[in-house]
Amino acid sequence: VAYFGEDVGLNSHHSHWHMDFPFWWKKSYDVTKDRRGELFFYMHHQMVNRFDAERLSNWLPQVEPLGWHHEIEEGFAPAAMYFNGQEFPMRPDGMHFHDMPWFTVKDTEDYEDRIRDVIAKGYVKTNDFHKVYLNTTEGIDILGLIVESLDHDYNRHYFGKFHSNAHVLLSKITDPEQKFGMPPGVMEHFETAT
């Protein structure tokens, strides 16, 4: 089902979505991006469901969640290339995540554990230590803001940059130390990250 990740329309949608809701957007710009976190979850949930549907229609099992300490069984060889003709790095079968020079797999795992912990508790604390319960209509929006590491008031440093770190770990899986100077993989670009 490589056609799914190579689909120009789907990648354009993903890229345009991130242009409408950029991760770097701040409240100080005085333009409200209503329900950014909720829409982040919705869009990604829909894309994963569509990918699962494509896999099932091709007699393949549903996609398995990534494990930070497990090998990624299936490789990926993107057909896309950079405008200068350089190919995007491929990922062979059986790769494992490795630490980056500026953050570790453990950092990302800790961020995920903290997010799971607040979901289990049912609340998150603001920067000034007030509890905000997640069983409200705003709960999914709050979780989305935290997962995508958007500008929010819920102890950003504690939750880190979970979503973007996961993209980078997957993108640079074949050259995490940048020893070979490989360009970023498809998962590091909004235009190719489906």
Image (cartoon, helix red, strand yellow):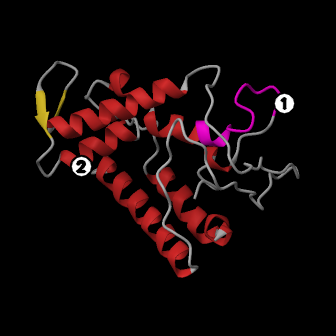
Q: Residues within 10 Å of mark 2 (few under 14, many from 20)?
A: many
Q: What is the magenta segment's predominant secondary structure? A: loop
Quadrant of the frame with the N terminus: bottom right
Q: Residue at x 56, y 56 (%)?
A: 15
Left or right of residue 172, residue 182 in this image? right
Q: Is residue 173 magenta?
A: yes
Q: Residue at x 67, y 50 (%)?
A: 186
- In terms of image quadrants, where is residue 71? top right
Left or right of residue 65, residue 98 in this image? right
Residue 57's spot in the image, x, y percent?
53, 81
Residue 39's spot in the image, x, y percent?
34, 55
Q: Which of label 1 and label 2 is nearer to you?
A: 1
The residue labelled by disc 1 is 180
Q: Is residue 190 magenta?
A: no
Q: Is residue 56 above or below residue 90?
A: below
The residue labelled by disc 2 is 140
Residue ranking furthest to the right: 85
Q: Residues within 10 Å of mark 1 (few under 14, many from 20)?
A: few
